[in-house]
Amino acid sequence: MPDSPPGRFWLPAPPGNPELAAFLEMLEEAVLLVDNDRAVHYANPAAGELAHRLAADPADPDNPEPLVALLPDEVFAAAAEERWSGDVRDEGSGVVFALRRYPWIIDHTPAHLWLLRDVTEARHRQDELRRRHGELQQAYARLASAQEQLLQQEKMASIGQLAAGIAHEINNPIGYVHSNLVSLRDYTSGLLELIHAYERALAPKLDEATLAAISDVRARVDFDFVSTDLPELINESREGLERVRRIVQDLKDFSHAGREAGWRRVDLHKGLESTLNIVWNDLKYKARIERRLGPLPLVECHPSEINQVFMNLLLNAGHAIGERGTITLASGHDAARDEVWISVCDSGPGIDADTLPRIFDPFFTTKPVGTGTGLGLSISYGIVKKHGGRIEVANSAEGGAIFTVVLPVHQPVRVGD
């Protein structure tokens, strides 16, 4: 048998099998034959090289203990006939080894044949691949979310254009109908005044038959009732048109159509009320609105985007309420922090603890399949973040969930529109 090369240790293979000895000596994997007491009965040259690399004492490079120390204790306690494989790390060098254990017999006594291979680079590559795969998954999720948000924003822009067109078309007939009702009210008032004047002037000069005939016609047309009800009908019609006019104006304010785009200083209360009017048909049968609004300064923002946030929060509050409940709107101004806040609180069951951390995740929804996209709160979160603000969510002490939108009064850094 050749002499041991410098810096290597090796022990002879079991006698009687020179082919096995030659094979083990050619292996690039380190081979150790170890008994249950961790005594080394054989080590091939590759094991000697590993021991030299891991030697803690440069004066004793052929000590096999660094390799033996890597062998897991629990494997020695396992049944002798079991195979085992796994990875171990040498804490001193950071080298990762792939280990394989095979059952062996030494002098009729169970032993362990160990194969060790340095897989540090391979594991690093695997870790890098896993890391990059995770980054790709995150990038894909962000891309999917951005695409959905873009689609949602395009949809909102289309709705805004549609609302602006409808508002323009409705405003025209509303304008002349409203003007006509004003004229009709004045004409009716004048005609009724003229009729009463004729009645006062002619009554003493008419004979009894004529007065009886006039009285009969007066009773038949219910002139007394008509003369009092007609002005009220005209006033109610004017009030209805004013209501339609306000709704149209709210549509225009909500979509912010026909005005200069970009950052503007606006009254958030006005935007909140406009949005509330737009979604009121979805809320009026199940919710009572309670307002606890404090004075707010004008806030620099994209009004249509903030109105979209209000719309999502109001609709979610309505969906959280069962048959009948209350939606509380509150606001305030923190002058020290140059911030304003507006909160929407519902009287529903609240949000469970498992759901709270995921409430703003894209595509996450607690609604039944087909009734929610899971994008409303995610888009709202992105809009508020774009404005340098934040959305806070919690369960209120009275029950139900409370969403609070916090926005800076001024924009110190203008993010691209």
Image (cartoon, helix red, strand yellow):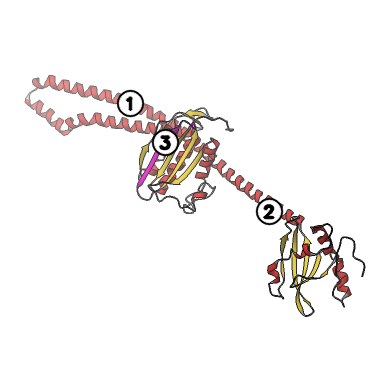
User: First in sequence: mark 2 or mark 3?
Assistant: 2
Residue drawn at point x = 30 percent, y = 32 percent? 237
Tell me which corner region of the image, top left, top right, bottom left or bottom right, holds residue 33: bottom right
Q: Measured along the vertical axis of the image, is residue 193 above or below residue 65?
A: above
Residue 76 visible in image:
yes
The structure residue drawn at horizontal position 40% and vertical position 45%, both measured from the top left corner, is 346
Q: Quadrant of the C terminus?
A: top right
Q: Which residues are magenta?
A: 321-338
Residue 286 visible, this orientation:
no
Give the foreground label among 3 and 1. Answer: 3
Residue located beneath label 2 in the image: 130
Q: Which mark sits nearer the N-terminus, 3 or 1? A: 1
Looking at the rendered structure, the secondary structure element under dot 2 is helix
The amino acid type found where label 3 is placed reads: Ser
When asked about the image quadrant of residue 116, the answer is bottom right
Q: Nearer the viewer, residue 208 or 245?
A: 245
**Residue 270 x, y percent position in the rendering:** 42, 32
Mark 3: secondary structure:
strand
Vertical placement of 284 versus 414: above or below?
below
In primary-sequence order, the first of circles 1 and 2 is 2
Alpha carbon distance from label 2 to label 3? 47 Å
Q: Which residue is rendered at x = 13% and y = 21% of the image? A: 200
Characterize the local packing of mark 2: few (<14), some (14-19) or many (20 or more) Cα atoms within 10 angstroms. few
In the rendered image, which residue does mark 3 sit on? 331
Q: Is residue 400 magenta?
A: no
Which residue type carries mark 1? Asn
Q: Is residue 86 left or right of residue 366?
A: right
Residue 180 - label = 1
